[in-house]
Image: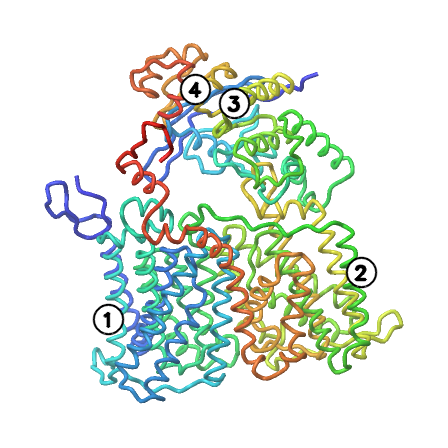
Amino acid sequence: MIEVQPDLDVGGLTVQFGGLVAVNRVSLHAAAGAVTGLIGPNGAGKTTIFNACTGVVPCHGGHVRLGDRDLGHLSTASRASHGLGRTFQRMELFDSMTVAENVALGPEAFLAARRPWSQMACSRNQRRDIATRTKEAMDRCGIAPMMRQRVGDLSTGQRRLVELARAMATPFHFLLLDEPSSGLDVVETERFGQIISRFVAETGIGILLVEHDMALVSGVCSYIYVLDFGNLIFQGPCAEVLSSETVRAAYLGSDEITVDETDEVASHA
Amino acid sequence: MSSSSPLLLSRDADGAFTVSRRALMRVGGLVALVIVGLLLTAAFSVGPYVVTGLADGSIYALAALGLVLTYKTSGIFNFAIGAQAAASAYVFYSFRDTVGLPWPVAALFAVILVGLVGSLLLERIAFWLTGASAAMKVVATIALVVLLESVLTGIYGVATIQFTSFLPNKGIHLFGVTILGSQIIVFALAVGATIGLYLFFKRTRLGVSMHAVVDSPTLLALEATNPVVVRRYAWGIGSCFISISGLLLAPALGIDVNIYLLVYISAFGAAAVGAFSSLPITLAAAMGIGITMNVMSDKLSGQTNHVLAELYTQIPFLVLVAALLIVPKARLITRGADAVRKLRPPTTFPTPVLLTGALAGIGLAVAIPFIVEPAYVNQYTTGLGFAVVLISLGLLLWTSGQISLCQMAFAAIGASTFGHATAAGWPWLAALAAAVLVAVAAGGLAAIPSFRLSGVYLAVATFGFGLLLQNLIYPTFLMFGQSDFVSIPRPELLGINATSDRAYYFLALVVAGLCAFAVIGLRRSRLGRLLRGMSDSPLALEAHGANTRLTRLYVFGAAAGLAAVGGVLIAGVTQSAGGTPTGPFGYFNSVVLLAVLAICGSQPIASPVIAAFLFEVIKIYRPFSNAWFSKYEGVFFGFGALAVAVAPGMRLSFAGRRTAARDGRSPVTNRTRLAMRPPVRVSSQGSHP
């Protein structure tokens, strides 16, 4: 039976860097059990929203809620231990470790946050749980065959999968994925979309996806938010967004946005 | 619309001059500060001390400006500025006093040899360190300190060389205070240098390029600016400033490299207040440090309490540590942090190889008291103590990616606490436990800077922490006291008398072995995995819920506890402990140990054991047992550590990067050049050109 997972609710989020308003009163709702897209040109503020949601940069207004819990005042580690997980646009991996060690350290770090002394030692049950989660996540992402390889030696696409597997192995309630397909080829991206869709269907957790690859976005997202210059300029179901004049103007100038033009979209972004 | 230039006057779009409001406020603030300063000086009658303080501060400012300039442009924090300045003063002394040249010529030679020629060497080292990890950057400049200190004391001896003044000493009288010509010259030099550098950075193409070169030399090359030339200018100017400051300091202090190393912490402090970036704030901070030290020396001159009487000498260390704890984290930008090569993990060996090696090592260690001369057993026991301290340093550096330059301070805390506990009648084991606990608490305190600092800033903070402990706490009753002596008895444990040298060696071997096993266990535990993760990516660890502040607290505590055990073992050899800077617990040993450990690799146990052998034991064997080696051992350690730090960069250079960067080329410009070549004619037969 699928566990009921919380929604992510962001309201009036504002982030400033000195005098620059990078994110201006952005509100969005990402439902559990679905993949919600967050798109926009480079510099639109997508990653800044992720950083603000996870406490990497401070918010200057608004709220971030995971289910009923307000995460606004918590540190990055506390937000993660409350179930808000993420991946990074510039991958943050443990390069000196193997693939299996990388994936296992996700749930291990999560469990270490329970008590101050939880960092010291690990119970036998926890060890078993970590091993199960690690194996499942590696199988899910198809990286089990390379489990003994050092992550620093892998290609970008393989590293993306390791980062995704680590996030999937950790018992998060909601995931923020930041451009997870950048550096992947067409076949890898297609497989990536299948992995995400299957994971959401099986676990019921929600995903907020920042992505430039419109083929991936249109394939997995049920609802899309469009950001430009820190402002939310459009939102709606996938088809509506793809046919919107406003989105086309922001993203591509006046050209029509189609799924077939994904390469062009990516290059413009 | 006028630009937001920080200069007082700027041109708007029409070319007309406008006054920057922000700059006007700054100038107003500065004027107000000067007026308040003058009023306070008059009220407390400290005019002469303020004048001397301004002159001293000017010298610190010159060095700090050199430090900031090179850090801004290369990302290398030059720990060796004190040694470099001392080298300059020694060369000046040689040419002026030994050769008999006129002082301007001697000074010019010193600046050319140490400032300019030295800058070429430093620029090369900085280039090879581009992309090196923060730990290796620290190791490289620390190695330079060790190398230069050894060379200079080897050539010129350890005694302070008295040096007569060379600048005019005729003075003018102003508001009842005599201001010497030398003081005016030094002050004008510092202020002029700051204004000149400030304008240079803001207004000249080369100055702007210096900002860019650390972050992206390739992009700079694309703009037809040779990054190597830019870096050479920066190192040239910075090194000359440091060299000149060394000359100016000589008449007041005499020439002694160990004194210079400490005095130049003032420059570190001033640069830290300016967030290692702002030149005017650095200048103001250096002046502030100079004035405060001089005024306090007057006000505290009658104090009978040793700590209070000497407090003024600690101002630079206090400023350094306080600035690193207070300056907003966002302002402490880690220069050149992009595209950093991660430290390679230590090579893992198959279990049979490890077991065989461990058994052979243990067998050899057990046999040592029976195969070496009895007089040398104590040297091996001290080596075991240092091995434990080095294991603790390795745990911090190689496992968790934290840098500590105060490890011997933790060892000293351990030794002194142990001495106090045994003096109070505690049994040996209980006293050892107390030593560990107190050191763990001190380690927790030292971990606080690591909550907000990493890399080079953490290294600087721990360096300051170690110096503060040495100068402020070592002489108090809490540690070694005014007498600088604490008795460290050897035990009778479980009915076994360990008071003889051989028995004490075996006790030390057992304790060191237990420490090694504890570290192996820790590395294999959850904490060990978190530490390795933190070394690679603290952000990833936090994004999965782990509180890395807690992780840092634990690792600093564990390392301090281990170092305390090492300290007790070391002190037990002589059955006494003291805190003299030249003794085993002196701050400089923390620096040397880092260099020696870097030479020996990153294995958690084997590397520290080999490092301890090199540091402590090798000197009893030929050809290292002669006076020449003990005089110049720092040269070997420094050169070795420097070679280890720069070797990966040198390998990359030989692969072609160096030539490309020197020519101002990059792969992108090469492609452009290729694209602009006339098309190659292909013969009609279709053969390849």
* Residue that numbered label 3 is attached to: A189
Q: Residue at x 31, y 18 (%)?
A: A249
Give the CA separation, mark 3 to mark 4. 21 Å
Q: On the rendered structure, is A7 left or right of B675?
A: right
Give the CA separation, mark 1 to mark 4. 60 Å
Element marked by disc 4 = strand
Q: Can residue B177 be seen in this view?
A: no
Q: Which quarter of the rendering shows the N terminus of chain B?
A: top left
Q: Can marks 3 and 4 be said to lie on one chain? A: yes
Q: Can marks 2 and 3 be said to lie on one chain? A: no
Label ID, residue B352: none
* Residue that numbered label 1 is attached to: B188
Considering only vertical position in the picture, is B101 above or below B69?
Answer: below
Label 4 amino acid? Tyr
The answer to which of A268 and B407 lies nearer the viewer is A268
Give the CA separation, mark 1 to mark 2. 66 Å
Q: Can marks 2 and 4 be said to lie on one chain? A: no
Q: Give the crowd class for mark 2: few <14, some 14-19, many >=20 residues within 10 Å.
A: few
Give the CA separation, mark 1 to mark 3. 64 Å
Q: Which chain carries label 3?
A: A
Considering only vertical position in the picture, is B494 above or below A54?
Answer: below
Q: Can residue A133 be seen in this view?
A: yes
Q: Residue at x 41, y 71 (%)?
A: B84
